[in-house]
Image (cartoon, rainbow, N blue to C red):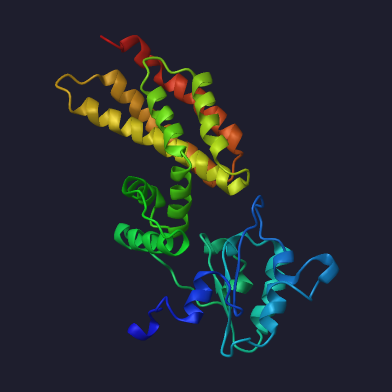
Amino acid sequence: GDELTACGECPSCRQVIFHSHPDLFRVGLPEGKSELPIEVFVGSAEKRGREGLCHDLSLSAMQGGYRIAVIDDADKMNASSANALLKTLEEPGPGAILILIATDSDQVITTIRSRCQQVNFTRLSDEDLHQILTRINMVEHEGELDSKLLEEAIRRADGSVSKARTALERLQSGESHELHKVTQLLGRQKIMSADLAMVFDEVMSQAGSDTNSQREAALLIIETSLQYFHQSLTTEAGMSQLDQVHSDCYLDAMDRCFEASRQIDRKISVPACLDQFCHDLEMLLRPTWNSAGQ
């Protein structure tokens, strides 16, 4: 109902928007890390137990009411982090509410899952993402978003606000130009793996140095390649004379794109995955070299 809708204007709402509310805590995967370290929860070795999220939640609320912690990337906790958080879950401080966000809940240890009420969220609609991103931009930048960049960011987001924001930031930094080079190269008559690797490296250089940013950039390269092959296959299917060689090669290339995406999701080394991807695309598309122009 309306009583659960934030007004966005009162002092508490403004504090939440600008990440300055004294009783709201947000933690997540540190940049450059693949695990949520124990220091996030109990502090550094020198101040163990005297700082960190668990210590903050043990204190009384500064503005009365509740102290709320949002733990993003909860499925990235290592064993030490999970055990530290477990103690707080078993004996939370007065008025403490913990919200754990995980992409894969199966990766959260059973003893933590059993103490949580699990809520599954579906992907947000494009309309919802459009409204949310527009609202965030008004608060943080007070300017208008480029409608084409916004549309492309939403298309890449797969219903996720965080993915949409990341995509939008990259598009605004000029990443779309680098991805266009990928499409142009795939449209050549003869595709060499060395050329692919060079263009892929240009895209990867635009991403951050942390592991998550590198994986997201690699998935974007693979998705761009997949879209090209799908569009090429659709074009072939609409021709009066079907080129079976091209069609078969595009199907094989699409299968290889799906496989590369699964490899990235399984945390296989990004450079190794992309290097093999380049090599395999050249091999899969070589039959089209001989049939080109026939």
Residue 28: image x %, image y %?
61, 62
Vertical arrangement, residue 57 with respect to residue 226, above or below: below
Tell me: 185 left or right of 199.
Answer: left
Q: Residue at x 37, y 52 (%)?
A: 145
Instruction: Please indicate, yes or no, whether residue 163 appears anywhere in the rendered image.
Output: yes
Tell me the quarter of the picture where residue 227 sits: top left
Q: Determine whether 202 is above or below 112 in the image.
A: above
State the quadrant of the C terminus: top left
Seen in the picture, residue 278 relative to 216 is either above or below; the reply is: above
In the displayed structure image, the side of residue 278 where residue 188 appears, left or right: left
Instruction: Examine the rendering and report whether any part of residue 1 can be seen.
Output: no
Quarter of the image with the N terminus is: bottom left
Q: Position of residue 229 (x, y in %)?
A: 34, 30
Residue 204 horizontal/vertical position (percent): 55, 36
Seen as rendered, the residue at the extreme front is: 142
Q: Is residue 38 above or below residue 54?
A: above
Residue 3 quadrant:
bottom left
Of the pair 79 and 157, the residue shown nearer to us: 157
In the image, is 60 to the left or to the right of 142? Answer: right
